[in-house]
Image (cartoon, coloured by chain):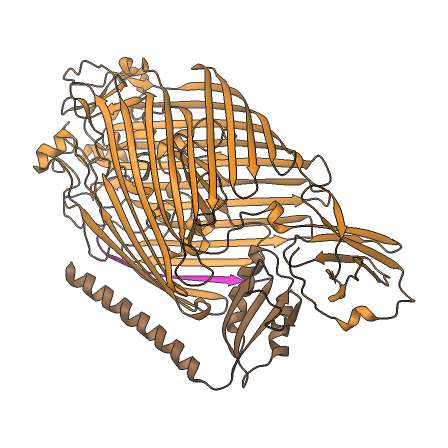
Chain colours: A orange, B brown
Amino acid sequence: MKKILLILFTLAAGSAAAQNFSGSVFYRKADGGTEPLPFAQVYHLERKNLIETDANGRFSLNLTDRATLVATYVGYTRDTVVVEPGTASASFYLAGENDIDASKVTAQQSTLPKLKSVKTEVITAAGLCKMACCALAESFENSASVTVGYSDAVTGARQIKLLGLSGTYTQMLDENRPVMRGIAAPFGMSFVPGQWLESIQIAKGPSSVINGLEAITGQINMEHRKPTDETPLFVQLYGSTDAMFEGNIASAIQFNEKWSMINMVHVGGTASKMDHNQDGFRDEPEDLNLNFTSRWLYYAPSGMQIRFGGRFLYDDRLGGQMGATKDNVFNLQNRIWGSRIQNRGADGYFKIGFPLNEENTANIALVTDFNHHEFYSFFGMRNFNATQNSAFANLIYQNEINDVHKIELGATWQFDDLKQGYGNNLTAMPMIVSPVLYNPWYDFSRREHAISGFAEYTLTLEEKFTFVGGANLQYNSLHGWLFAPRANVRWSPADWVTLRALGGRGYRTANIFTDNLGIFSTGKFFSGSPAGEYHTMDIASDISGLNLLEDAWTWGGNVTFYLPFGAEDTDTFLSFDYFRNEFNKQVIVDAELNPNSIYFYNLDGKSYTNTWQVDFSVDPVERFNITATFRYTDAKVTLQNQGLVERPMTSRFKGVLNMQYATAMNKWTFDFTAQLNGPMRLPKYAAQEWGMETSPVYPMFYAQVTRKFRGFDVYVGAENIGGYRQHHAIIGADNPFNSTFDASSVWGPLMGRKFYLGVRYTLWK
Amino acid sequence: MKRFLFIALTLLLMAGTAAFAQDKKQKKQANIQEVTFVTTIDCKNCVKKVEANLPYEKGIKDMKVNLDDRTVWIKYDADKTDKEKLAAAIVKLGYEAEEVTPAEAKK
């Protein structure tokens, strides 16, 4: 039992004679048994006073009106009971906090929760504020695990890499609901405003079978601001020297104890066009992004929870040559290479969870989601249009049989209806002539149904050992039966060390165009012919014969040492990771077979990555944190005519050093981040063009100062302080309608140094 | 590029030094006292709320919220405020607060 804090409130010692209500507070032990809890505190919310239980865990008081009584005890959960007038007695049950929720994460910037069986990097709200701009993609600058880059020099689409592989192999979750799938993926990271988020969890490897099969290199889960946040108004404004701007408003309202909601609005974009390297192309597209979400929570006293909400997004961007307009007829008539991309999306979700017993150790949950996304674009002479409707339902039964055993069983239904296609010349544009008459319109539409059943078992032996094993069996209308086993183990033989291991299988259906958006920012022809003939036009028939299933195993391990130095109450840790990922089936996009074409074919040989990572974090003195992390990746892929080679455009290493100092109560916060970005193997055509086999190693520096006032923060910062840029990002920029044109070999920053200023205002309830 | 790096680092260091200096200045002031309250703070959001608001109460020099113990530790200038006002400031945010003597508070 924890040490008892004696707090004597004179109020409780009032006239016992007039009291008509008596209550008892119990401690519910981990094994389910109860015992009275003496000297626990009971707050009477309406009267705002405090009563203390006696040596037998009992208290009494006089009630005339409806009363909300909250029983609390330091180190325990609390229990709230609403007492109607006339009620004679009530019981309160508190559980030891460590018994039920040991993985409490406090508000540090980036943490390694000790008790999670999968090593999870958490970027909390404070961490999100370090890099104050703007979308989810930028939130990873402090992380070596995740590398952020551009997919090309035209669209502004940010791409992440985890374990050396494209972000399309990472499952994105929004509060444990799969998002950013299919055609919503290429800009997904750019369309989640960082200011909407409360935290991000990065788990490397295929951790759980509950959310489907698509996590191959890992899962990134985003937690949004919550309806229960006591912030009726949050406003943020941001502007930078490169004409990027954004504004966010969030408003969380609690109507009563049951209903609450949060609405969030985002307006952002890039207001003007710039061409720093004078290649005639905009460095970033002009862009307008609008985003709205509404999220609701109903929480019944019985423990039943309903969460539902929806989101709309609209984005319209214009890239390409400086003279490009949104009217491609005008562009093409004037031999201007332009690219306009419009994204429109709407989605809705509904989640419901019921406790099946009073303690909520057994419960059932249903998660449903519907997503509609439209993608209209042109890239020079080529048009690409797509519409996607996806539906998802996941039914999960969970039973914590006792402290040791827990099982989860469930079934998932996923449906994707994807209409997509491209045309490759002027007449493809429907506004001029019918595409059917003059021009081939290559259609790659598909419809996919998948039904899966899964089971997951968790064994927990106190805080020392956790084993999670599960399997997911799916019937897929395109690929037949798919089976994915996954397991992970955590073992802490002592307080100062934690060992973890995990492994498992993942599958996904490739979406060759949106997974590789950069291929459109080239003049190359698309072909599915593995022979690699020299082409003078797209050969779509071969591409349609591809097997789109991608199938990979990933396994890895981690050792984390908690070291006995550094400021009080903080974790100093040193952590080592190793992960290996190996593909059985993969769709290869090869731009090296010959210089004027991009070939799509199925992997014939090996494709793997090995990733090593070291992380170190210490607070040498209070409020001063130093985090250093270094990743090394060895990624190989078998390409036609080349054999097993280093995967192109994959950085070999990344090092990140972050220092943060805050004054008392965080009134001032100073952040400094230095990155060292390792070389990438350049594709052959780029290597020839630039006369180098690999891209250079380059550093990046970021700094930010935040000043907090009551209710609002002001922050100023600089990105890419060294002003490092990839000067020649576009090959053949002077002749973009030639097949040698290529804007997809981006290895470095396109924008130079920039300064920014932002304000955040929070109104607390 | 190196020049800019140098400038940036220098600025950062200066800012850091200024911040340290500010800390020191505060320590010089005479009547600094400490107090710990046990409160009804019991959620991460409650911690955020207290951390966002309490620092701006008059006379508070430093504070820490401990969610595990549900305590708020405050360092304050006794010439500018007192324990009752501090407790009232916590109550104003919606939480009960009762002083504990340091011996009782868990370290």
Question: For residue A157, which quarter of the picture?
Answer: top left
Q: Is residue B32 visible?
A: yes
Residue A455 against residue A604 in the figure, above or below: below
Left or right of A122? Residue A22 is right
Residue A582: percent from left, percent from top? 32, 25
Q: Which residues are magenta?
A: A749-765
The extreme right residue here reads A17
Q: Position of residue A694 (x, y in %)?
A: 14, 37
Point 52% across, 79% down: residue: B59
Quadrant of the drawing holding the N terminus of chain A? bottom right
State yes or no: residue A199 in magenta.
no
Q: Nearer the viewer, residue A374 or A333?
A: A374
Q: Quadrant of the C terminus of chain A?
A: bottom right
Q: How many marks?
A: 0
Residue A366 position, x and y percent, is 61, 32
Residue A753: say if magenta.
yes
Front one among A482 and A311: A482
Where is B4 relative to A157, above or below?
below
Residue depicted at 68% across the width and 62% down the height? A4
Of A613 and A152, nearer the camera is A613
Image position of A674 (left or right of B24): left
Q: Position of residue A271 (x, y in %)?
A: 31, 51
Residue A425 seen from this side: no
Which residue is situated farthest in the front direction here? A493
- The vertical placement of B45 against A472, above or below, is below
Front-most of A103 and A378?
A103
